[in-house]
Image (spheres, rainbow, N blue to C red):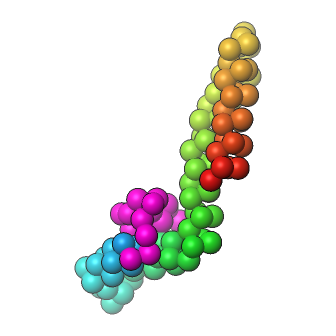
Amino acid sequence: MRDPFTVLGVTEDAGDAEIRQRYLALVRDFPPDRAPDRFREYRAAYDALIDERKRLETKLLHTNEAALSRLTAVTLQAASPGAGRAAKRTVAALLTEGVMRTLTD
């Protein structure tokens, strides 16, 4: 499933009312009888965001996916022959940043 925030077109700090309003607007434009695939996608995104616990899990997953992508790219550079200490320090910094962000969010 795509990122629920992107599917509904809301920001990560959107409240319940904004999420519900956006969902209802999308369902009005794409009802289940005309666009069943879109409706299922909107409903799954709404279900993931309307529950506070699920929304926090979604935010954490979204944040960690971006950090993991950056970490993977830098790790591949650091693992290449001739990579210096700077590349290895960058990997360590990204790992630390990801752990700290997870603990503080």
Q: Point out the residue furthest to the bottom here.
A: 33
Span highlighted in magenta in the image: 1-17
Image point (36%, 87%), residue name: 32
75 is higher (above) or lower (below) than 105:
above
Viewer-proximal residue, 37 or 53? 53
Viewer-proximal residue, 90 or 42? 90
Residue 66 is left or right of residue 29, and the answer is right
35 is higher (above) or lower (below) than 83:
below
Image point (38%, 77%), residue name: 17
- The quarter holding residue 37 reads bottom left
Q: Point out the residue furthest to the left here.
A: 29
Residue 79 is left or right of residue 40, and the answer is right
73 is higher (above) or lower (below) than 3:
above
Residue 51 position within the rendered picture, expressed as x and y whole percent measured from the top left: 56, 77
- The quarter holding residue 66 reads top right
Residue 45 position within the rendered picture, expressed as x and y whole percent measured from the top left: 48, 72
Q: Point out the residue furthest to the front here.
A: 104
Is residue 8 a member of the stretch shown in magenta?
yes
Residue 26 is left or right of residue 102, and the answer is left
Image point (33%, 78%), residue name: 21
Viewer-proximal residue, 15 or 37? 15
Residue 10 position within the rendered picture, expressed as x and y whole percent measured from the top left: 38, 63
Say whether residue 44 is visible. no
Image point (36%, 63%), residue name: 9
Is residue 102 a member of the stretch shown in magenta?
no
Residue 44 is left or right of residue 67, and the answer is left
Say whether residue 100 is visible. yes
